[in-house]
Amino acid sequence: MRADIHFHLLPGLDDGPATMEETVELARAALRDGTAIVVATPHVRHDFVTDPRDLPERMQEVRERLARERIELELHCGGELGHELVGRLEQRDLDIIAVGPPGARWILLEPPGQGPGEELHEAADDLRSRGFGVVLAHPERSAPLMADDAFGLRRELERGSLLQVNAWSLAGRHGASAERMAIWLVGSGAVTALASDAHNVTVRGPELSVGLQRASWGLAPHRARMLTEAAPRSLVQRGMPVPARAA
């Protein structure tokens, strides 16, 4: 049973599906590909969703529609949180987009593609001090994290962050550099989960099978399957250790 922890499913909120019909199409595609659990992660940043309190109602609308369509996906509310917005959100806002059971909740944090990386580290530290684990979204696409022999990435790993690599990065859809970094990260054993980062059914679809196939080139089959099955499923159902709050 595959679990996808990075998936732009909610309609009309970001650069994912524009309509409920497109959401239904995406959900059907995920189910056909073998995904059973989806964390809906709309962009929570200055250019898209800035008020997470709207998300539970939107999630319920999608759940009801998928139930009518008999699309049996287990849905969870989350968000892809832009690092620059962390300090502006209240605790209850973060609770809405956090995933996992009480005491083990985590947030998907989006690193910058370019520019300095220090603000990302500050944002991640802020989340940890407020009681949340951190899962970094597609680090292979972040030049600051991967610069200087991945110094910034190693720093985050040392502080307890987990890594989510995009299936389509492994397939070369995000360019040669991201593909090279994704292959290196997966091969190194540093990655906890693969995710589709699905936005639509044409260019950025919900095919975790693509990432599984590419990961299997460098890992034993059971290790590759863990990245799309046991590990992301455990993150959703059991969460991750939450660091002690700063005094």
Image: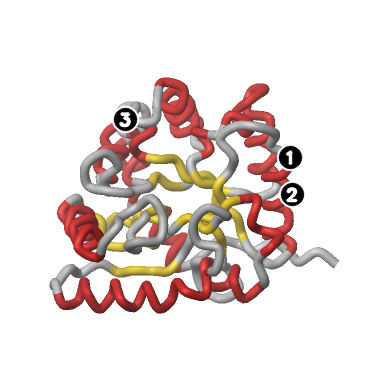
Q: Earlier in the sequence, mark 3 or mark 2?
A: 2
Q: Position of residue 9 (x, y in %)?
A: 33, 59
At label 1, the amino acid type is Glu
What residue do we see at 45% from left, 28% from top? Answer: 178
As displayed, is residue 189 above or below residue 246? above
Give the quarter of the figure containing the C terminus.
bottom right
As displayed, is residue 50 above or below residue 201? below
Give the quarter of the figure containing the N terminus.
bottom left
Mark 2 residue crowding within 10 angstroms, few (<14) / some (14–19) / many (20+): some
Of the two numbered discs 3 and 2 in the rendering, the one whose residue sits closer to the viewer: 2
Distance CA(mark 3)–CA(mark 2) = 31 Å
Disc 2: which residue:
122
Of the two numbered discs 1 and 3 in the rendering, the one whose residue sits closer to the viewer: 1
What residue do we see at 52% from left, 58% from top? Answer: 44
Dot 3: what SS?
Answer: loop
For the image, the number of numbered tags is 3
Q: Position of residue 63 (x, y in %)?
A: 28, 75
Disc 1: which residue:
118
Disc 3: which residue:
171
Q: Earlier in the sequence, mark 1 or mark 3?
A: 1
At label 2, the amino acid type is Glu
Residue 57 in which image quadrant: bottom left
Mark 1 residue crowding within 10 angstroms, few (<14) / some (14–19) / many (20+): few
Q: Position of residue 142 (x, y in %)?
A: 55, 34
What residue do we see at 71% from left, 60% from top? Answer: 87
Dot 2: what SS?
Answer: helix
Residue 175 in which image quadrant: top left
What residue do we see at 18% from left, 53% from top? Answer: 29
